[in-house]
Image (cartoon, coloured by chain):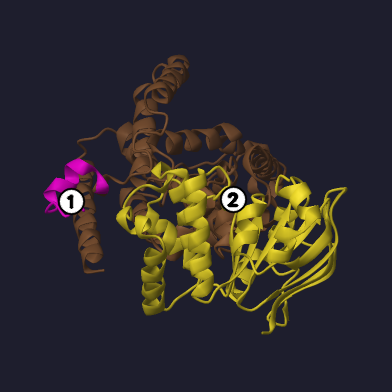
Chain colours: A brown, B yellow
Amino acid sequence: MNALRKADLKAIIISLVVFVVLQALLSTNSLDAFWQLNIILICINIILSVSLNLINGYTGQFSLGHAGFMAIGAYTGAVLSVNFHMPFIVSLITSFVTAAIIGGLIGLPTMRLSGDYLAIATLGLGEIIRIVIMNVNYVGGAAGFMGIPRHTNFAWAFFVMLFVLFFIKNYVNSSYGRACVAIRENEIAAEAMGVNTTKYKVLAFTIGAGFAGVAGCLFAHTFYIIHPSSFTFLASFNYLIMVVMGGMGSITGSIAGAFILTTVSALLSNWPELRMSIYALILIALMFYRPQGLFGNIEITSLPVLKRFKGGKQK
Amino acid sequence: MGIMLKIDNINVYYGAIHAIKGISLEVDKGEIVTLIGANGAGKSTTLRTISGLLKPRTGKISFEDKIISGMPAHRIVECGVSQVPEGRRIFANMTVMENLELGAYIRKDKNAIQNDLKRVFKHFPRLAERKKQEAGTLSGGEQQMLAMGRALMSSPRLLLLDEPSMGLAPLLIKEIFAIIKDINEAGTTILLVEQNANMALSIANRAYVLETGKITLSGDAKELAASEEVRKAYLGG
């Protein structure tokens, strides 16, 4: 228990150092506007990939509707900020709650499905959410929702991300997380051990959807405008790729996946037609040489190289 | 001794297929009862219905005078019935220790869990040697031991064993059955489903013979093992 808290403390200190360095770069304008935006996007994408990892990686439920929940959060946050002039924190929390409730409601029937069927159902539901939004004039319909205050700065994105990371890390290391992993490994055995599989699947789906909503809210307040076309199933695939690339069931992996893919796509933004080809080539190479993803299901803190520094208490 | 498990005229369907056609049976406290029969007779289906993985369409199952048919599987585990599923179904990517810890998932009392862990290691010394090993890398026999150990970690009063001899070498089968007997003598009632009728009858007190979803014979295990009918059908002459 003490060792755990020590590790947490270390992680917090490291994150704060990273924050201070990046914030210093931003405040001194050492980064141009494009990269300032991309750093925020990386934080948002990390929230999305880590929350999707809770559903896909840890619980083993193949969901393809993450962009839909992000859209719910984005529009909830935007409406609250623009039409009701709520403070940003209220928008963020309400986005979480709304996306989580809708996620839970969708999760109850769909979590009875498995494998391909679940993937198809969540894919369809993600699209339904988008198309419903597209047809609601109150939120701008197909033209998009404009005039959202740009509340999201680097500090907001970073600390919300940090909160989500710690929440999910503690969740997967708790008995809840162990139940999730047991379901992924073997659902029948988990049930025979007394794990209430439906409950934990729906719970993981709800929490994952809620944090996607938070990411959506941050996203909406980053750009002046949100548009239903930002939340297509292609966006869901994008987050899925981040999770798969980093490794299903590894938080470090999701962070790496989100960081690498967001950076690569930013670097290639001048060559949009090349971008998707290179993206695809990276993925093909990854599947050939490292099908379990960059980190597999291992966290950076338990890599053998790092263990040596921790005093060699390996066996 | 009192009746622990009572199955009263259950009917179980897989879609349109009528798999169990009105089975009734009883297991007394402290017994080893075995269900034997050919492939597709409904042995495993009966077991999965008891543990709640399947639901009977009609009929009822009670455990210690409490009706458990219709309860979700995780609630039945809490009542004190634990199943070792067919084909073992261990958590292959977890270590032996993590598998055992998951077996105690529903329990909170750390001391009692530690005691049961000791007990499992006493029954299966080989698991203690391999605590840190990934479960998927164990041999078939060791995986069976792990599946049984994991089920014992929920401290069940009734242990349901589904084909523990499946895919194991004859020598290992002997070892596993000796352990089953030990577990029973330590106070756990056992309902055993087995294709290897010879082995099952040798350790059981009583037996039921299943044929295409119905019980055709039942009685004392030794008497059944000696009966002409059973010998011809299941024991190879």
> Does the magenta run of residues contain A170?
no
Which is more toward the observer, B219 or A20?
A: B219
For disc 1, the marked residue is A17
Whether callout 2 and callout 1 share a subunit is answered yes
Q: Earlier in the sequence, mark 2 or mark 1?
A: 1
Circle 2 crowding by C-alpha within 10 Å: few under 14, some 14–19, many from 20: many
Amino acid type, residue under disc 2 in the picture: Ile
Whether pointer 2 and pointer 1 mark residues with C-beta atoms closer than 8 Å, the reply is no
Q: Is residue B10 above or below residue B174?
A: below
On the image, the x and y values in percent for residue B183 come to 50, 69
Looking at the image, which residue is at 56% across and 55% down?
A189
Name the image quarter holding residue A114: top right
Amino acid type, residue under disc 1 in the picture: Val
The reply to whether residue A51 is visible in this rendering is no
Circle 1 crowding by C-alpha within 10 Å: few under 14, some 14–19, many from 20: few
SS category of the residue bearing label 1: helix
On the image, the x and y values in percent for residue B163 come to 61, 52
Q: Which residues are magenta?
A: A302-315
Q: Which mark is residue A72?
A: 2
Q: CA distance from mark 2 to mark 1?
A: 33 Å
Looking at the image, which residue is at 55% across and 57% down?
A190
Which is more toward the observer, B146 or B57?
A: B146
SS category of the residue bearing label 2: helix
User: Pointer 1 indicates a residue of which chain?
Assistant: A
The reply to whether residue A292 is visible in this rendering is yes
